[in-house]
Image (cartoon, grey):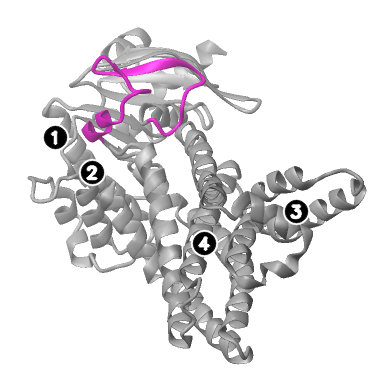
Amino acid sequence: MIIATNVSKRFGKLSALQDISTTCHAGQSIALIGPNGSGKTTFIKCLLGMVVPDNGFITFDGKNIGMDWQYRDRIGYMPQTGRYPDHMCIGQVLDMMTDLRGKRGKDLDRELIETWRLDTMLGKRMGTLSGGTRQKVSAALAFLFKPDVLILDEPTAGLDPLSSEMLKEKIRRERAQGRLILITSHILSDLEDIISEIIYLQEGRLVFHKAWVTLREDTGEARLSRAIAQLMKKAN
Amino acid sequence: MRKIIKYVMLDILRNKIIIAYACLLVLLGFSLFNMNDSTDKGLLSLMNVVLIIVPLVSLVFSAIYLYNATEFIELLVSQPIRRRDIWLSLFTGLAGSLAIAFLAGCSIPVLISGAMKEVGLLLFIGTLLSIIFAAIAMLAVVHTRDKARGIGLTTMLWLFFTLLFDGIVLFILFQFMDYPLEKAMIVMSMLNPIDLSRVIMLLQLDISAMMGVTSAVFRSAFGSPLGMGIAIAVLLMWVVLPLWSSLRTFQHKDL
């Protein structure tokens, strides 16, 4: 569904992505793992067209995203730090996004809004929200339009254990519906039972892209964190 | 695209600065017409004030608004919306609200004072200047990531167009006094939208005779309907070129 070919990006002297090539299929649930500054968020922003690669290209369902913008209609994106106009309240933001996406009156997935009881605080201004609540709004927006692809950048960071569990449950259900899910997270234990594939990035390079099952067999470890640690030791 | 313009406009009109700006223009207009005994002189003073204030407010307000809208722009870019539409909507919203504020603020005192002659031109030029400097601000903002630096840059641009440019022109005039500079003067006036607007308006007012030899040069160049058409076309270029250039940069910008 998404094919990246030799994607490279430099920010000044820093090379954020180097020759990343990978393929993601519908129905997969892929974890993007790597140390801080390894290029995970940059890669995600490239997928969304927010960052334009210096080299290489990305296709979405066979179409180069450099020329296209409509493909984003099929993506739900939850940013690492959701930034919204401070003076708008939750209800206005939700309404504006629905309007801009042309989905007014359409069938929307308001499940997260209801489970987190965001609908009781629609009148709260974005500027006054706590980091966790803001994350919840971001997540709710990502799932709202029933997209084919979900891109979640550190979805559970800042959420309380209960809300985080609700979100994971939701992700699991969406995965069962055959959506492509891309997640980055540093909390590897959160990922273990959600993901099917792992992409490991380090210093902007793609170290490996393997199925979780294969990785388990290769390393003989049942836990993701141990498996990754073992691979990192080997690499050094 | 219309939807984004709606959200931008709503956002700007909620802003009290733009209303204060319109009120300031009303106050200035009334005081200038009351200070001068003839409406012609009042109009001339108003024109001079407009030529200073409109570019300043358009530049600085647009820059501040665009920097404050960074989050909004980031949010929009990740959505299924063309980048071109986002940028042009921002421009339309900004230029539109600035133009509306100017028209509302300026036309009230002008119409009440009964100065009918050449009022249309003043309003037209002022509106055009609002749009031109909104476009220039967008160009400045798209090239500077840092808010403080960007606002500083727009202020410097304002200083350049209102003061420094004229200084440079005078300097050139004095240095090359012995040479015929008429054609060069006309070209130079086109390089500054404020100067060009001033020339256009002065030529339409009766006092242009006081401008001396230069006036004759400008009159021969811009006095005819064709010359006037060219001058306005040049002003329109001052909207199109910065906007087009900023759009090209924005389309490849990393957010």
Label 3 to label 2, Cα distance in Å? 59 Å
Q: Do labels 1 and 4 share a chain?
A: no
Tag 4 subunit: B
Q: Answer yes or no: do the residues labelled 1 and 3 have beta carbons within 8 Å?
A: no
Between residue A114 and residue A70, name the one nearer to us: A70
What type is the residue that disc 3 sits on? Phe
Tell me the number on the disc at residue A173.
1
Tag 1 subunit: A
Residue that badge 3 annotates: B165
> Which of labels 1 and 4 is toward the front?
4
Q: Which of marks 3 and 4 is nearer the N terminus?
A: 4
Tag 3 subunit: B
What kind of element bears circle 3? Answer: helix
Label 3 to label 4, Cα distance in Å? 19 Å
What kind of element bears circle 1? Answer: helix
Across the whole image, how many numbered discs are drawn on residues?
A: 4
What kind of element bears circle 2? Answer: helix
In the image, is residue B34 above or below residue B41? below
Tag 3: Cα neighbours inside 10 Å, few (<14), some, or many (≥20)? some
What type is the residue that disc 1 sits on? Arg
Tag 1: Cα neighbours inside 10 Å, few (<14), some, or many (≥20)? few
On the rendered structure, is B215 left or right of A174?
right
At 70% across and 68% down in the image, what residue appears? B209
Q: Give the range drawn in magenta.
A: A49-75
Tell me the number on the disc at residue A167.
2
Q: Answer yes or no: do the residues labelled 3 and 4 have beta carbons within 8 Å?
A: no
